Amino acid sequence: MSDCIFCKIDQGEIPAEKVFEDEGLFVIKDVNPQAPTHLLIIPKRHIPTLLELEEQDRSVMSRVHEVAGKLACDGGFDQSGFRVVVNCGAGAGQSVFHIHFHLLAGRAMQWPPG
């Protein structure tokens, strides 16, 4: 989508430090971190929310969680704990309507989160 910030980052139109990238997704640091480690795992295909997922997205959605685990191990917070969050819709806190997953670590997480 031409006005999507994540699509523009993926295409190199907006600079961002990608900490990981493969054929289906990329990972950047959140510009407004809510934890010492706050990464965004973003599928390259523009999917607005969880509600628009299609059969073709199954492998990249699985890859999101595989990459989250790898990043946790590489970052050394696999043993201390981490959280993976996806917001679906404005009422849930989604501000960019291109599906993305927040990987948070480095502090104690509270429950309930909202």
Image: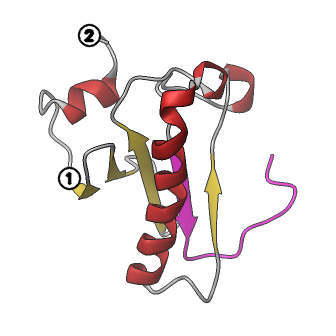
- 57 in relation to 64, above or below: above
- 76 in relation to 38, above or below: below
Q: Residue at x 33, y 43 (%)?
A: 24
Q: Which mark is residue 2?
A: 2
Q: Which mark is residue 17?
A: 1
- Residue 30, percent from left and from top: 40, 50
Q: Name the element at disc 2.
A: loop
- Residue 56, percent from left and from top: 48, 29
Q: Between 26 and 22, which is closer to the camera in this rendering?
A: 22
- 90 in relation to 99, above or below: above
Residue pushed farthest front? Answer: 55
- Packing grade of label 2 (10 A; few <14, some 14-19, many >=20) is few
Among the two numbered marks 2 and 1 on one chain, the one whose residue lies closer to the N terminus: 2
Amino acid at dot 1 = Glu
* Magenta span contains residue 106: yes
Q: Residue at x 74, y 23 (%)?
A: 91
The nearer-to-camera label among 2 and 1 is: 2
Q: Main secondary structure of the magenta part?
A: loop
In which image quadrant can residue 8 be found?
top left
Q: Residue at x 17, y 31 (%)?
A: 14
| Left or right of 77 in this view: 1 | left
Q: Which residues are magenta?
A: 101-114
- Residue 76, percent from left and from top: 45, 87
From this viewpoint, is residue 33 visible?
A: no
Amino acid at dot 2 = Ser
- Residue 40, percent from left and from top: 44, 49
* Magenta span contains residue 39: no
- 114 in relation to 87, above or below: below
